[in-house]
Image (spheres, rainbow, N blue to C red):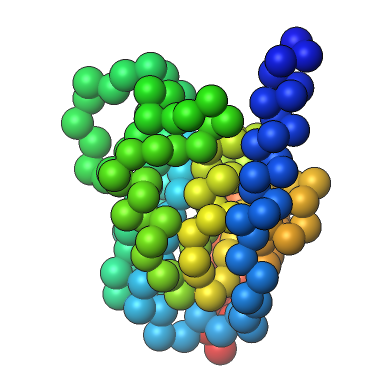
Amino acid sequence: MSILTQYREKLHLKDVEQGIQQKKSTGNFTGLAKVGILMDATEEATRIEALTFVEQLKKKAGNIQILGYIDTKEVKAKLPFDFFCKKDLDWLWRPKNPLTNTFKQETFDLLINLCQTDCFPLEYLAVSTNANYKIGALTDYPNNYDLMLDSKNLEKYLEQVNFFLVKFSN
């Protein structure tokens, strides 16, 4: 990794740490009015699996907003959810477009980041978005989420999310 890339990462992580919302909530998922879903939508298989999960989640939550990141310069395909791509990022991998700004300004009862790998744009959005409770993959930064799940497989990750949603709803 080049020195310039290491420097960019360091600046990005510093920016993320400053944006962490310190308000913490207990995990009670009964009556979820608004849920935010962040996902890496680059692969079609991942999109299909995530959208299946969202359909199941609609039984428990009222309003679900999905925002996907596609790791390409430009996207010509039509997708059934809002998304952004590399051209919408600044030098520190922070999303800068109207869709991401609107998403960040929302207040969610629950925010779920479905990405299990290091994806700086989604990590930045997860940290800077206001949510009563945040679920995400295990990272080196314990303050990013209220609940971190350790799984590199999306199917297992979604099973864990469902498990905790059911347990915390009772």
Quadrant assignment for the C terminus:
bottom right
Query: What x and y, as percent, mark residue 165?
Result: 54, 73
Q: In the image shown, does 72 or 10 lie closer to the viewer?
A: 10
**Residue 5 is drawn in which quadrant?**
top right
Q: Position of residue 3 (x, y in %)?
A: 78, 14
Quarter of the rendering occupied by the N terminus: top right
Image coordinates of residue 87 in percent, x first then y, are 38, 23
What residue is rendered at 35% in x and 78% in y? 33
Q: Residue at x 65, y 77 (%)?
A: 24
Residue beneath the point at 58% across and 30% down: 92
Look at the picture and state if 166 lies above or below 129.
Answer: below
* Residue 42 in sight: no
**Is 6 drawn above or below residue 125 in the view shown?**
above
Residue 38 lies, in percent from the top left, at: 46, 49
Relative placement, left or right, of 97 versus 155 is left
Query: Measuring 73% from the left and 60% from the top, which residue is drawn there?
Result: 143
Quarter location, residue 20 = bottom right
Visible residue check, residue 63: yes
The number of callouts visible is 0
Extreme residue in the bottom direction = 170
Which residue ends up furthest to the top in the rendered image?
2
On screen, residue 83 versus residue 93, left or right, reads left
